């Protein structure tokens, strides 16, 4: 498989757009969500990160078919 810089940049740009939408549409809610995240124990944050990582890998794998 050959590295495609344009595809990588498109994926990175899409990630930036999707990450910025909650801050644009509801900055107050995002602030509150961050406050709540700060109160969670590290173990729960780690499990959530692992679940998101797994979901992302599954989506990438599915996109290859």
Image: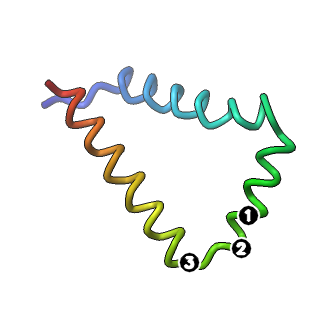
Quarter of the view holding residue 21? top right
Can you give x and y, in whole percent of width and height, for residue 53 in the image? Answer: 37, 53
**36, above or below 61, in the image:** below
Residue 49 horizontal/vertical position (percent): 46, 60
Q: Is residue 56 above or below residue 21?
A: below
Q: CA distance from mark 1 to mark 2?
A: 5 Å
Which secondary structure lies at badge 1?
helix
- Between the residue at mark 3 and the residue at mark 1, the CA separation in whole angstroms equals 13 Å
Look at 21% across and 31% down and name the residue there: 62
Q: What residue do we see at 51% from left, 26% from top?
A: 14
Query: Residue at the location (31% across, 52% down)?
Result: 54
| Residue that carries the numbered disc 2 in the rendered image | 39
Label placed on residue 14: none
Is 55 left, or right, of 20 in this rendering?
A: left
Q: CB of mark 1 within 8 Å of CB of mark 2? A: yes
Residue picked out by circle 1: 36
Q: Which residue is mark 3?
A: 42
Lower position in the chain sequence, tag 3 or tag 1: 1
């Amino acid at each position: 498989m050959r590295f495609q810089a344009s595809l990588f940049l498109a994926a990175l740009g899409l990630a930036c757009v999707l990450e910025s939408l909650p801050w644009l549409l509801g900055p107050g809610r995002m602030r509150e969500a961050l406050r709540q995240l700060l109160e969670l124990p590290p173990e729960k944050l780690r499990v959530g990160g692992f679940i998101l990582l797994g979901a992302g890998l599954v989506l990438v794998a599915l996109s290859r078919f």
